[in-house]
Image (spheres, rainbow, N blue to C red):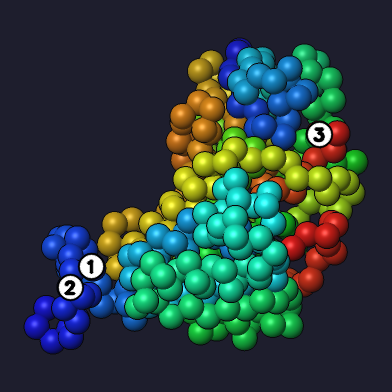
Amino acid sequence: MPVSVRIPSPLMKLTKNQGEVSAEGKDIREVLSDMERQYPGIKERLYDEDGSLRRFINIYKNEEDIRFLNGESTHVQDGDEISIIPAIAGGILLSKNL
Amino acid sequence: MSDLDFSEEQIHRYARHIILPNVGGKGQKRLLESKVLIIGAGGLGSPAAYYLAAAGIGTIGIIDFDEVDISNLQRQILYNTADIGRAKVDSAKDTIVSLNPDVKVECYKEKLTSKNIKEIIEGYDIILDGTDNFPTRYLINDACIILNKINVHGSIFRFEGQLTVFKPKEGPCYRCLYPEPPPPGMVPSCQEAGVLGVLPGIIGTLQAIEALKLILKIGRPLIGSLLLYDSLKTEFRQMRLRRDTKCPVCSENPTITELIDYEEFCGVRV
């Protein structure tokens, strides 16, 4: 099922400068995998070496942080909006390869 | 507003507050008696401090160890071209006092660390975080939890901004949102990321508004909610923030009880 995924500016280089992309999946995990398929490299930015979502990046389904829903197993449906929201600190770069 | 003892000049200066329902002379008096600390006198701190001074906040503390650089002037409105090379805190004080002599400005030309932060923030009602680096943001968060201070948090990146209010016990803190700062390895470059000139003005003035609301106890402050501003889309969104019952600093059983000086990613400054 297609959902829209909002991309923060630190990651927009990977999505060809698109701030909003479409991805498929029945839960957050699948949606993020589909994102990786479409935009290789994005997974590395979202997950650490142990395969957990990085602690300075939060994923929201609509207005809710998925940590307070079912984490990556949070079910998504057509029309949901997924947002990737990293910590930002000001003029300092957050992630690699910008 | 019988016994509020405003001077004639103050009655005129603050007339638009005094006639405003829910503020009035009493509210203005409260503003004049309040103390707000601005941490980082940069893109966010400049407009926040300037507007708070105009609104008649009685004491404004400013901490920043930097000097004014010409590249600051694209967005840091407290400074003029003639101020290049001066200490930001001194220059900020001049600008504020010439706008409103009622304001007492306390300057701290120093770097905020685990050693001095408690002593500095202790005397203030509200802390406004306008810093540009993660180590200081975590330090401010943890100190505010320990000393029970309200932290009005703003941050910007390129074309986007974030805003929220962390009020201990009532709402989440920064670590509920992001438990740990990014590791230094994730921040390899110290080059400035760039920021659209007016953007910090939007977020900094929103921080100032939240501070006023908190002092005046009016409206609904942005506690438990993260405001995201996308200047390119002209879009404001709000995300719900919740307290993390396992938060390392603000939960019932915190694992962090002492302040931490995180490794600096580079020559970052407060």
Q: Are marks 2 and 1 on the same chain?
A: yes
Residue pointed to by mark 3: A98
- Contact between marks 3 and 2 (CB within 8 A): the answer is no
The structure residue drawn at horizontal position 84% and vertical position 20%, both measured from the top left corner, is A40
Give the Cα distance between marks 3 and 2: 52 Å
Name the side, left or right, on which B37 lies relative to A34. Answer: left
The structure residue drawn at horizontal position 53% and vertical position 80%, both measured from the top left corner, is B106
Q: Are marks 1 and 3 on the same chain?
A: no
Indicate the amino acid at tag 1. Answer: Tyr
Position of the C terminus of chain B by quadrant: bottom right
Residue pointed to by mark 2: B11
Indicate the amino acid at tag 3. Answer: Leu
Give the Cα distance between marks 1 and 3: 47 Å
Q: Are marks 3 and 2 on the same chain?
A: no
* SS category of the residue bearing label 3: loop
Q: Chain of mark 3?
A: A
Front residue of this view, candidates B88 and A93: B88
Front residue of this view, candidates B38 and B257: B38
Residue B169, how many percent across, how many down? Answer: 49, 69
Residue B33 visible, this angle: yes
> Label 3: how many residues lie within 10 Å, few (<14), some (14-19) or many (20+)?
some
The structure residue drawn at horizontal position 53% and vertical position 23%, both measured from the top left corner, is A80
Front residue of this view, candidates B75 and A43: B75
Marks counted in the figure total: 3
- Contact between marks 2 and 1 (CB within 8 A): the answer is yes
Residue B232, how many percent across, how many down? Answer: 54, 27
Residue pointed to by mark 1: B14
Considering every residue shown, the one lying at the far left of the view is B2
Q: Chain of mark 2?
A: B
Give the Cα distance between marks 2 and 1: 6 Å
* SS category of the residue bearing label 1: loop
